[in-house]
Structure formats: C-alpha cells, structure tokens
Amino acid sequence: MNLFIYDQTFEGLLTAIHDAIDLNIKPDNIISTKSFQDDLFATKHFISTDSDKFDKIWNQVKENSNEQNCQRIFKAFLSESSDIEMIIHDYIKLVIDTPYNVEVNFSEDSVLKLNNIQKKVGSEAQRVLMFVRFQKTTDDIYYSSFDPKYNVIPLTVNHFRNRFADQKWVIFDTRRKFGYYYDLENVREITIGKQKIDFGTGKVNDDILHVSERLFQKLWKSYYDTINIKERKNLKVHMQFLPKRFWKFLPEKDFKMKYVLN
Amino acid sequence: MKPETVNKLKISANAAKYDVSCASSGSNRPNSGKGLGNAAPWGICHSFTEDGRCVSLLKLMLTNYCIYDCAYCANRKSNDIRRTTFAVKEVVDLTIEFYRRNYIEGLFLSSGVIKNPDYTMERMVSVAKDLRIKQNYNGYIHLKSIPGASDELQQQAGIYADRLSVNIEIATENNLKMLAPDKNFDSILNPMNTIKNKIIENKEERRKFRHTPRFSPAGQSTQLIVGATPDSDKHILNLAGDLYDSKNLKRVYYSGFIPVNSYDKRLPALKEPPLKRENRLYQADWLFRFYHFSIDEIVNDEYPDLDLEIDPKLSYALRNPWIFPVDINKASYETILRVPGVGVLSAKKIILGRRYSKLNLSNLKKIGVVLKRAKYFITCNELKAPTINELLPENVRRILLKENRPVKQFNKSLYKQLSLFPVN
C-alpha cells in the first residue's frame, strides 16, 4: 500500500501527483497531513511541496487540454472532500496519458466525478453571491459572515470587488476562520477575533453597528414579508431554493426582528 | 429616511407583487470608474419567498394611484385600498441602500398611471436617470413602459434601463376589452414595436460607433394572465410564439390568475390559482424556445389544451409513438431532445460522450438522464427492453402516473399488533 502525504495545499497535491507519476507508482491514497493517521503496513511518501514540479505538471495539463479545464480541477480541489485527491490524480493522469481531448468523455469515471464535484463547488460559490448580506458598521465598512460548505470565498472575491468598488467590505468565512477585506484599492486576506462578531449568527455587535443599519434591515424584512403571495404558498420549493443553513445570515429570515421602529 | 417609508414600502410592494417578471439576466453592464454595481449577465437571485418565487429585483410601484379600471388588477381605480406615492429620491435611496447590502440585484419599477402617460413615464425615467448619473449606479434596472408615452421618453427609458416591458395580460383582444375597457391590443403592441425597432436600430448604430450607449440591452418582456378568461392554451402559446418571433421578446411570463377583485362578476371564481396550468405553460414555452419544438406539435386543434397530469414533452411523445425508440448512440441532437427525461444539458453530454464509446444505461444515468421516463423511449448499448411500441402509449402513461403518485398513507386500522392472549 502506497500512501502519499501532502501539506493540504494545491501545489502540494500536484507535487504528490508528479512524484507518483515519476516513481511510476499508483498511489492507494493521497492524504493531507491534517487527516493523516499513521498506518503500520503502508509505504509512506512524505511530499515536500516543490513549485518546479507543480509548474511542470500544471503546464502539461494546460498543454494537453485547456485553461478552463485547469480552472475545473482547481475548483474541484476547493471542495475539500475526502476522496478529491485521488479523483484529481486519476483525472490528471488520464489527461496527460491520452493523446486526444478527454475532458468531455463522460463515460470515463474520473471525468464525470470531477465534473460533478466542480459543479457543486461552482453552485456553492453562486450561493455566496446570492446570500451574502452586508451589515454597515460605524467605520463605514460593510461586513458579512458566511459559512460555505466548500472553500469557495476565494472564487467570489473578484465578483464583489467589481460590484462594490466604491465601498469597503469584508467577507468572512466563519467555518475556516479567514476572510477578505477590500480597502477601496486592494483585496487582502484577513483574520478577525471573536470580540466584535458572533460567529454563530454572523452578527456584528450593536456598539459598532451603523445607526441606520437596523432601519434598513427592518425595511428589507417588511418588504420581503409583503411581496409573498399567500395564495401561492409553496414551502417545498421555498426550502429547496433557500435551504435552512443559510437562514441565520439573512435579515429577512430573522424571526426575532421587530417591525416597530424606534 | 423617514419612518413613514416603511408604510409606503409595504403599500407599494403589495401593489407590485403580482408582476411575475423577476429576471436580472441578459445585460452585461460593467462597473465603470469605481462606481457602484454591475449587471451580471447570468442574473443572480438574492432571496426566495414562501411562495417559492425568487426575489432578485426590488419591485416597487412609483405610485398605486391609477386612472384605469382594469378588472384583473388590484390597483384599479374603483378599489378602496390604501394609496401612496413615492418621491423620486426615496426610490433612489432605497435601491442604493439595499443594493449596497447585497439584498437585491437591481430595481424593477412600474407605476399606476396618474394624470397622463407622459407625466407618469417621465417620473419613472427620472428615477433611472438619477440612479445612473447622480449615483453612478451600474446595477440592473427594469422599467415598465407606460403605453401611450412619447417616443422621446421611451428612448430615454431604454438608455437608462436594462430591460423594458409592456404587459399584455389578456391573450385575446375581445376579452381584454371586456376586462379593461380603457385598453386595446394596439395600445400595447405599438410600444412593443417601438422598443423592438429601437433595439435593432441601436444594434446597427453600435456596429458603426462603438461607444453609442446601449438601448435596453436585456431586451423586453411581457406577461400574460392565465385563467382569468376562457382562452385555450393553444391561443396563449400561439400568441407567445408570435411575440417571440415578431417582437423579438426575451421572455413571456405566464401568471396564474389570482382573484384579487372577487366582487367583479366578469371574472371567474377560482378556489385557488391555476398553478399547475401555469407550470405546464412554462414547460411548453421552454419546449419551443430550447428544445426545437414547434408550437403546432405541442398544442393544435385536436389538443387545444395542455395535459395537466403529464408534462407537454411526455404527452407529445405518447401521441407520437412512431418516432420512438430513439437510438442514443446514433440519433441527431434534435431527436435526442425529444426523448422525455433528457434535458438540454444531458443531450449535449450524450453527443459529446458518445464519440468516445457507445453509451449504455449506467452511462446515461451518470450523465443525468431521468431513466424512469426515458427508458421507454430509447435504445442504447444494452439488451433490448420493452419500449413504448411494445407496451402501448396508454400503458406507459399509466405506469408513469403510478410512479409519480405519492405513497398512500399507512392505514392503521387494517394492521395492528396481534394480541398474545386473545380475549373472548
């Protein structure tokens, strides 16, 4: 049994795949140091990430297929699912070994699996674009928490930078404890302490909330409640489109919010 | 922002909610010069209400006062409801603040007609103009065009908005005249023609001068009410098809009639809105827009109404069993699209995938074909199984309906735990 252990990064994974191809070994599993448990009988290969090896494999994939396909592989990697390393390994090996385009051969198992996973990651990223809700703080920063199933916040940064170019914003991943901050010029990665933000509900503490914020949340909720047509009630579809795991971040689904304005 | 805005917002949203248009797609307006917002060409929904509809745009009525008295409308002149009027600045502020918090994708603005069409339209255009010029806002704007407004205003509206729409509401002119005495088909189709011609003109102009501002880049749409009049589905779909062809419409929306004015005897008394029929109409709409069907194949003189029990594609297949079974590994894309259970995406994947190897049932399943339905209509690299021609259409229909039916509630009185010690 051959185990390849890499350091959780995408570069590390591709280095591992490079080494496996180089040594002509089919790995039984490629796992990250985070989920690695020692196995007495396995042959273990500890991979040290090497950017030259990464470039070599990555360029080979680019040559044999196209830029879009590389995006797909990276997206699939962001899913962080437990067997994604082996799927990417099989896929890359297939792309490199086949002399013709293989990325649309859906009767091949790894192609189909990789495509399905990257599609799920893509739709989770779309959900971030849909359900992020900014709260304005006293220093005019629009803050938002999110708890995505996959590590998709990096995929959405460009969208928000283009759209909200004239306001400072923060999007924070409460599950992975990192986020992005846009300061009207650049976007940079940040971490935030727990003092001012409730990671469970994603809400900003009252003392740093902008005076008008509550009003707009209430306006939005009352708008949301009004446009519902009661005669057409269809909770099944509602739940399908707006799963409960997002509700905690949405002001319109905040049942404790009072309509009365003070 | 004043506290009374909450009330205004409620009244206005309540008045605007029956307009079903929600698309925010089709326009690719970039954010220019570090302003606010951009229009995503694929459209983004931001929330969903309990009736399952998406909330993408902030739907508002500039005012719900109206000089018209249309029987199907909640805001008709003779209704005794709360009325309100927004100031231009209020709408602009609400839109900007909601947009900044990522609540909405843009603004959908319509209005009741006050004084005259030109006055109403002018106020609506000034909202769009303020947003675009004063606020440097590049998000989505959908304006409802007021029939009868001048060409000048239509032109301005098209330049500031991403999409314009004029609602037809009723599918036949006689019925429209009966329910809305102030309206006729010409007053609705004329503005549609104007918008269409302007879009075509604008496209040609942009070919010559690249920086000509776009005119209504996301096209125009309309809405038809279903179930308020006895019009058949054939009639409705033919009108829709005609609009797509001759007016270059991007979308026709179908809206199940909700009896908002139940006292009006010209309208039918419905227990609940015809949601199933609405759904089937959308399915039929998709068939002729994306599945290469002609309207005649979906509804014709023999079958003027859509089957409510099964979807229009399946019902087409059951009426035309001789084109089946389709060989997945050989048939053309158009033929594969006609198989019930195969969508556009799966059909494309089949075409791509079969270049490498012959596809069998398990391949099809992984591709995403709904085999439950498709298996009666196809042959593939698999042993021969009974298809629609052996089973006969009526049996296939029965089998498929049976599978769709929900499992009956477990009847407790029939089955119970037996007693160890029978008492007698």
Image: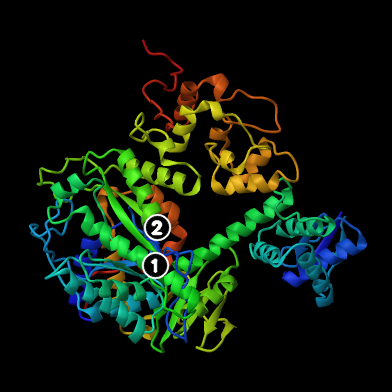
Residue holding disc 1: B199
What colouring does the structure picture have? Answer: rainbow
Residue at 43 percent across and 31 percent down: it is: B407
Q: Amino acid at mark 1?
A: Ile
Q: Is residue B417 left or right of residue B226?
A: right
Work out whether residue A104 or residue B404 is closer to the camera in this orientation and state it: A104
Work out how far the residue at label 1 is from the one at label 2, CA to CA, in angstroms.
Answer: 9 Å
Which chain letter matches label 2? B
**Residue B248 is drawn in which quadrant?**
bottom left
Residue holding disc 2: B248
Q: Is residue A241 left or right of residue A210?
A: right
Which chain letter matches label 1? B
Badge 1 element:
helix
Work out whether residue B43 or residue A36 is closer to the camera in this orientation and state it: B43
Q: Amino acid at mark 2?
A: Asn
Badge 2 element:
loop
Measured as percent of width and height from the top left, residue A236 is found at 39, 48
**Residue B382 is drawn in which quadrant?**
top right
Is residue B327 visible to us here? yes
Residue at 55 percent across and 80 percent down: it is: A180
